[in-house]
Every structure is written in C-alpha cells, then in structure tokens.
C-alpha cells in the first residue's frame, strides 16, 4: 500500500492543480469518481487507459433507476472484467498485487500447499475493484460535505495534517459509505432472545451501530478528535473489509491534497445531488465554491 502512495498523490495533483483559482470544484466529478479506480489500477497493474471503462461498468451495476428493484452486486467470476489482465500478467509478471497473488503459496484448509486458483484471484480482484471503487468515492464526497459544515475543524486540519488520519476514521464512523449489509441466515440462531429462522435474510445497520451512544458518547456530533477504538464501517472480525487499508490510504491522501490547495470551501447546494445505488450511500455530485 505504501509503495503506491506517490502515484496516488501524483494523480490527485494532476486532477486538482488545474482547478486552483477556478473558483470551485466537484468533489465527485473532479476527484472522487476518478481516484479510487486509478488507485486500484495502480495496485493491480491495470493499464490507466482501461481503468475508466472498468469503473463505469462497475458503477452501472450498483445504480438504481426509479421503479426498478435493487440489483444484487456480483463480485463473482462470471463474465469477469479482469480475466484478460490475469491471463496477461501470468505471462508478463511485474511489481504489483496481481503478480503477487499469482505466485503466492499457502496452506489451505486441507493442509495442501498450493497457489490461488484463477477463480479465487478473480473473486478477490472483483471484490477490491467493485466494493472499493464506489465506497471510496462516497467517502471523498462526505469529506467535502462534512468539512464544509465544520469549517473550524477544517481549519485545524489545514494547520496540522497529523490530524488527518483520525479525521478519516471519524468520517467513516459518522457517515458510513456502506451503511447497510444483508446476510443469509444459514441456521436457526437466537439474537437477543428472538429466534431467527434458517433461510431468513437479516439486514445489519452498521451505519446505525456507528451512532450507538453506548459506544460513542454524543454520537451525533462530528469530532475529528474523537478517540475511536473501532467503528463498524469496515465490518468486524471474520467479516472485516479486505480493502480497509486501501480505503484509508485513499481517504488520507485525497483529503490532504485537497486541503493543500483549497483551505476553504462551501457546498453549492443548488447543484448537489445524492446518488441512487443499491448498497452505498453518498453523493453523485457535490460541487463546492472555493476561496
């Protein structure tokens, strides 16, 4: 992850520098919609020319239209977007995560030492690209909204960038980009004295858990100085997000680079628009006026 930070900063600079002095930017169109897929492309070794088309196809799979039932996000191997890159990288190894996965050996649950299968690699790559693309876009959008609403905390970050990592954790807690998860119940289970039957679907509101006063005093207050042992925006335990480190890295770099160039901004609410998707929550457009 640390090895790709310079590339991520370079991309942010390319995106933001032309906007300095222009009077405004859109946190989604100018940065949030572009940066996550670029970062995933750097990590996996996907050519930059192909990254935007992949991002658009992934976005379309999560988009909701009026009157339509929600689509179920698929991160499997059928019709996979990345199969050709895995096949090509098998013959052309490089210094990237895809090459690492192709060559890594491990002991599986049967005690067999082996490499990952092609389908296993496809599943992981799809997960990182699909889940990590939309969620990080929304995280960057929430940064634009919340720091417009809390200019005193924004000024603290401008003056002291060491506060940025904890600010990202508070952003994730306060406005979880993926606030709802659903699970199929594989067997009867008792939850708080009530039996949930096998075959049920359980909806888990991790965004609500992040506002639980028993865990976070004054939970509806946004505070970049809050001490957070852990929040549930990345899940917990066995269900912890595999892309958490990547999302945190992108959030920190994006916020740092924005603050470097735009220490003040206000949201243009007349043109801001929430996204309609099946699984994530955030902004489709968040234009701001800059000083």
Image: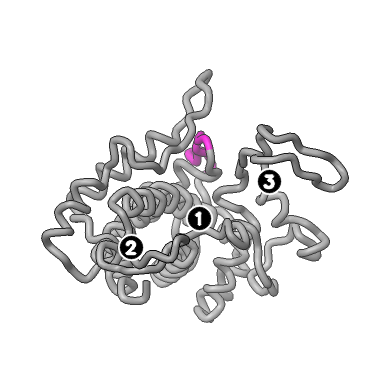
Instruction: Evaluate whether residue 258 shows in this view.
Output: no
* Residue at horizontal 77 percent and vertical 56 percent from the top: 212
The residues tagged by marks 3 and 2 sit, at their Cα atoms, a distance apart of 39 Å
Residue at the spot of label 1: 139
Work out whether mark 3 precedes mark 2 in sequence or the reverse, and give the earlier one. Answer: 2
> What mark, if any, has residue 38 been given in the picture?
none
Please tell me which residue lies in front, 125 or 217.
125
* Residue at horizontal 26 percent and vertical 47 percent from the top: 82
Q: Is residue 276 magenta?
A: yes
In the rendered view of the protein, which quadrant contains the C terminus? Answer: bottom left
Q: 171 left or right of 250?
A: right
In the depicted structure, whether residue 66 falls above or below residue 128: above
What is the x, y in percent for residue 268? 50, 46
Please tell me which residue lies in front, 88 or 188.
188
Which type of secondary structure does the marked residue at label 1 adopt?
helix
The residues tagged by marks 2 and 1 sit, at their Cα atoms, a distance apart of 22 Å
What is the x, y in percent for residue 170? 62, 65
What is the x, y in percent for residue 233? 60, 56
For the residues carrying marks 1 and 3, which lies nearer the camera in this image? 3
Instruction: Evaluate whether residue 74 shows in this view.
Output: yes
Residue at the spot of label 3: 205
Residue at the spot of label 2: 20
Based on the displayed image, in which of its 4 quarters is residue 173 positioned?
bottom right
Work out whether mark 1 precedes mark 3 in sequence or the reverse, and give the earlier one. Answer: 1
**Which residues fall within the magenta stretch?**
269-278
The residues tagged by marks 1 and 3 sit, at their Cα atoms, a distance apart of 18 Å
In the depicted structure, whether residue 198 falls above or below residue 157: above
């Amino acid at each position: 992850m640390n090895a790709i930070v310079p590339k991520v900063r370079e991309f942010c600079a390319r995106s933001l520098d032309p906007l300095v002095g222009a009077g405004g930017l859109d946190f989604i169109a100018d940065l949030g919609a572009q940066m996550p897929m670029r970062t995933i492309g750097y990590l996996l070794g996907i050519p930059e020319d192909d990254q935007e088309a992949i991002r658009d196809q992934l976005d379309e799979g999560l988009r909701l239209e009026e009157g339509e039932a929600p689509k179920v996000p698929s991160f499997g191997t059928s019709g996979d977007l990345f199969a050709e890159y895995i096949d090509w990288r098998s013959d052309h190894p490089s210094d990237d995560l895809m090459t690492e996965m192709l060559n890594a050996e491990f002991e599986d649950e049967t005690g067999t030492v082996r490499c990952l299968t092609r389908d296993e690699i496809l599943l992981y790559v799809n997960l990182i690209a699909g889940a990590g693309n939309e969620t990080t876009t929304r995280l960057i959008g929430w940064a634009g909204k919340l720091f417009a609403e809390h200019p005193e905390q924004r000024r603290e970050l401008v003056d002291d960038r060491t506060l940025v990592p904890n600010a990202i954790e508070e952003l994730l807690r306060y406005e979880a980009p993926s606030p709802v998860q659903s699970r199929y119940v594989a067997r009867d289970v008792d939850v708080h004295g009530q039996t949930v039957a096998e075959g049920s679907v359980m909806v888990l509101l991790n965004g609500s858990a992040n506002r639980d006063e028993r865990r976070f005093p004054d939970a509806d207050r946004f505070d970049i100085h809050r001490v957070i042992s852990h929040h549930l925006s990345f899940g917990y335990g066995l269900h912890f997000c595999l892309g958490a480190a990547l999302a945190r890295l992108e959030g920190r770099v994006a916020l740092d680079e924005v603050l470097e160039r735009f220490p003040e901004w206000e949201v243009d609410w007349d043109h801001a628009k929430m996204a309609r998707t099946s699984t994530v929550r955030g902004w489709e457009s968040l234009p701001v006026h800059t000083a």
